[in-house]
């Protein structure tokens, strides 16, 4: 890889710093896709001892690259994203990845294939963290930023993705407790 290729890759990835998600921080500021990706990566790093059988370095790589397709399509909230949106994002991402230096493109494509298949512990863990981080962030955000449908979404989202592991299931349960307390405190129950 040349230095110019490296810089060009970084210039594309930088777009995620400006790509706003349907989420706000605890102070009410709109969150970027890059911030979300950073935090699920941190979550994976901190869970190293909870998942000794998993290749956490691979999970970290998955977390880092999981939303790069949004460099090309923007962030579409899960409740608004269609299969056509997903297909368009995946096609744009894979087309870009195929232009990268061979060894990087091969690794990224292999990771994306594994992530899409959701068969390995690593892929399941990355996907669970992706869902959980969104829920945690919504719980941290002011409830005034929630849309009406998010009260129920916070209670139902991500459950299928945590079923593979008891520790992650219990984490989802704790997140639900936080959700219910937040709703109750706001008088929205």
Image: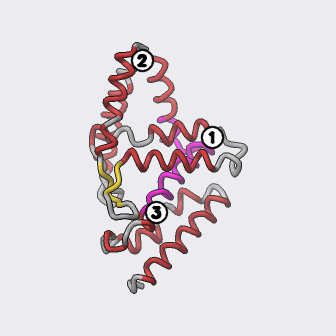
Q: Which residues are magenta?
A: 112-137
| Location of residue 10 in the rendering, given as x and y in whole percent from the top left corner | 36, 29
Quadrant where the N terminus lies? top left
Q: Quadrant of residue 92?
A: top left
Image point (30%, 38%), residue name: 15
Residue that numbered label 3 is attached to: 135
Residue 144 coordinates in the image, percent (x, y): 32, 74
The percent position of residue 125, horizontal first and vertical second, equals 58, 49
Tell me the SS state at disc 1.
Answer: helix
Earlier sequence position, callout 3 versus callout 2: 2
How far apart are the alpha carbons under marks 1 and 2?
24 Å
- Percent x, y for residue 80? 29, 58
Q: Which quarter of the image is occupied by the C terminus?
A: bottom left
Please give the name of the residue rendered at 39% of the width and 44% of the height, measured from the top-left corner: 34
Q: Main secondary structure of the magenta part?
A: helix
Q: Nearer the viewer, residue 103 or 121?
A: 103
**Above-or-below relation of 144 to 136:** below
Image quarter of residue 81 = bottom left
Q: Left or right? Give the position of 185 relative to 59.
A: left
Q: Measured along the vertical axis of the image, is residue 91 above or below residue 164?
A: above
Distance in Å between CA atoms under marks 1 and 3: 22 Å
**Residue identifier under label 2:** 101
Per the image, the residue denoted by label 1 is: 56
Residue density around tag 1, few if under 14, some if 14–19, many if 20 or more, within 10 Å: many
Q: In screen coordinates, is 63 left or right of 84?
A: right
Work out whether residue 11 or residue 129 is closer to the camera in this orientation and state it.
Answer: 11
Give SS at disc 3: helix
User: Is 6 included in the stretch rendered in magenta?
Assistant: no
- Indicate whether 29 appears above or below 147: above
Q: Are marks 3 and 2 in contact (CB under 8 Å)?
A: no
In the displayed image of the protein, which residue is found farthest to the front?
Answer: 27
């Amino acid at each position: 890889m040349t230095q110019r290729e490296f810089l060009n890759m970084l210039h594309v990835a930088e777009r995620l710093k400006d790509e706003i998600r349907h989420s706000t921080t605890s102070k009410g500021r709109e969150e970027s896709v890059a911030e979300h990706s950073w935090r699920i990566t941190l979550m994976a790093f901190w869970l190293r001892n909870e998942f000794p059988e998993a290749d956490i370095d691979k999970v970290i790589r998955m977390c880092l690259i999981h939303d790069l397709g949004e460099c090309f399509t923007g962030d579409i909230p899960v409740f608004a994203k269609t299969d056509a949106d997903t297909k368009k994002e995946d096609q744009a991402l894979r087309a870009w990845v195929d232009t990268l230096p061979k060894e990087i493109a091969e690794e990224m494509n292999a990771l994306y294939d594994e992530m899409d298949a959701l068969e390995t512990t690593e892929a399941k863990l990355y996907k669970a963290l992706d869902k959980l981080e969104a829920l945690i962030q919504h719980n941290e955000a002011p409830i005034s930023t929630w849309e009406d449908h998010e009260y129920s979404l916070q209670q139902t989202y991500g459950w299928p993705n945590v079923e593979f592991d008891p520790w992650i299931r219990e984490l989802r349960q704790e997140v639900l407790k936080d959700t219910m307390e937040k709703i109750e405190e706001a008088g929205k129950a």
